[in-house]
């Protein structure tokens, strides 16, 4: 059996499910420094008969697999090296440990699915932002994707500046920690939700911080260089 290669999403799921701590010594470890350990040694996966016996002796689920979230724990390099391919005896204490790992493995599996979904969403939103910025698509193209009841009110030329965000603004997704991709009556743009977004986000005409569609403030409709 070749050594299993973990994906970035699997590593993140294992690390986050155990709160970023080494399973064996409880020391905090960085994600990049973590080694994923097999509680039931990976080498035993070569022997189906032995795995079947382990399931019976250690009260493991029938669908338990050696390379499964229910057998993976985050460890520091020292603990991983010390443990190696050791399989601890089936004492009541170790059976309790295994039971805990199996239960947390279910949570790790869900986290992994969530991380993969978020990654796909972020990629899609990133591409949309690029296409909007380069003119490949425009606000009207995005509007056609929204159900009629969710469309924001039509653009009204010369409207009074809005100094606060309203329910008419709909968040399409996040471009970064504090930057959201939004759509409102002026179209699609970006807004900064940080408490102090900085002068670069402040419109010199209306004093708001956007949203912005390129160099145009969607709060007042003016260009930043007008």
Image (tube, rainbow, N blue to C red):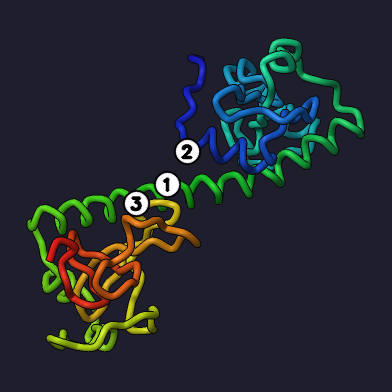
In front of the other: 200 or 2: 200
Secondary structure of the residue carrying tag 1 is: helix
Residue holding disc 2: 9
- The residue where tag 3 is placed is 122
Q: Which residue is mark 1?
A: 116
Q: Nearer the viewer, residue 3 or 32?
A: 32
Callout 2: few (<14), some (14-19), or many (20+) C-alpha neighbours within 10 Å?
some
Determine whether 152 is above or below 120 in the image: below
Percent x, y for residue 116? 42, 47
The percent position of residue 111, horizontal first and vertical second, equals 55, 48
Farthest residue, direction right: 92
Question: Which residue lies at the image location 78% right of the left edge and 41% below the top edge?
Answer: 99
In the image, residue 134 above or below residue 184: above
Q: Secondary structure at mark 3?
A: helix
Q: Nearer the viewer, residue 60 or 225?
A: 225
- Toward the left, the furthest residue is 136
């Amino acid at each position: 059996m070749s050594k299993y290669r973990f994906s970035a999403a699997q590593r993140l799921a294992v690390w986050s499910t155990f709160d970023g701590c080494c399973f064996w010594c409880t020391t905090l470890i960085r994600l990049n420094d973590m080694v994923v350990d097999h509680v039931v040694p990976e080498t035993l996966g070569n022997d189906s008969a032995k795995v079947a016996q382990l399931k019976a002796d250690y009260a493991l689920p029938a669908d338990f697999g050696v390379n499964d979230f229910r057998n993976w724990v985050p460890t520091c390099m020292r603990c991983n090296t010390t443990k190696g391919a050791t399989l601890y005896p089936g004492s009541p204490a170790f059976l309790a440990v295994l039971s805990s790992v199996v239960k947390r493995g279910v949570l790790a599996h869900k986290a992994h699915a969530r991380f993969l979904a978020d990654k796909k969403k972020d990629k899609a939103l990133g591409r949309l932002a690029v296409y909007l910025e380069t003119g490949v698509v425009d606000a009207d193209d995005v509007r056609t994707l929204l159900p009629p009841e969710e469309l924001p009110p039509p653009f009204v030329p010369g409207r009074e500046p809005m100094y606060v965000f309203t329910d008419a603004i709909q968040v399409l997704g996040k471009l970064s920690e504090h930057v959201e991709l939004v759509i409102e009556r002026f179209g699609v743009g970006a807004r900064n939700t940080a408490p102090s977004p900085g002068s670069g986000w402040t419109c010199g005409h209306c004093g708001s911080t956007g949203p912005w569609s390129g160099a145009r403030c969607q709060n007042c409709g003016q260009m930043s260089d007008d």
